[in-house]
Image (tube, helix red, strand yellow):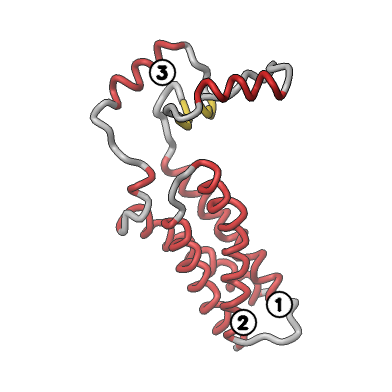
Amino acid sequence: MKKLIIASLVGGIILFVWQSLSFMMLQLHSSQMQYTPQQDEILAVLESSGIEEGDYFLPTTPTTAPSAEVQEEYMGKYWGKPWARISYHKALDMNMGMSLFRGFVIDIFAAFLLVWLLLKFAEFNMKTSVMASLAIGLIGYLTISYLNSVWFETSSIPELIDTLAQWGLVGVWLGWYLKR
């Protein structure tokens, strides 16, 4: 039990440290949060529109669109024209401390799940640890980040770098520590 707890805590710390480096020091995700000099005008339009907080894909059909034919006609009207994804909030009031705490807890839990799984392996060595860690990371990347990048025409390279780096490092740590 002690080995499971220590392996999970250190694994979670490795994940958390990599994520902090990725966003803050290495700026891997800066292309996903670009600045536009028109931000004040865009935000003013959104605020004055009366839009509710939420995530939007523009254009799309209303949820009450009665048939596939109507939806096809509606989308044909916008084909080849601009589109956007919007995550709208009425106030910028992030709680950095709570967000960091929640992220850290999630990282420890993710590491715990990986450690639990690795401890079930009949044969365990460094290669198995690294490959299993990368496989789990890549499953998450492929089914979430990459799939979203396919549908929404965005780059998921920063997430791929994060996946390979953080899960590779955790795999090396666990391969060393759990084998002892």
- Dot placed on the residue nearer the N-terminal end, 1 or 2: 1
The residue closer to the viewer here, 113 or 75, is: 75
Q: Which residue is mark 2?
A: 178
Residue occupied by mark 1: 119
Residue lying at 69% horizontally and 16% vertically, measured from the top left: 64
Dot 2 amino acid type: Leu
Looking at the rendered structure, the secondary structure element under dot 3 is helix
Q: Quickly name the residue at label 3.
A: 46
- Residues under labels 3 and 2: Cα distance? 52 Å
Q: In this rendering, which labeled residue sits more in front, label 1 or label 3?
A: 3
Question: Which quadrant is the N terminus positioned in?
Answer: bottom right
User: Label for residue 15?
Assistant: none
Q: Amino acid at mark 3?
A: Leu
Disc nearer the start of the sequence (1/3): 3
* Cβ–Cβ under 8 Å for marks 1 and 2: yes
Mark with earlier residue (3, 2): 3
Cα–Cα gap, marks 1 and 3: 51 Å
Residue type, numbered disc 1: Leu
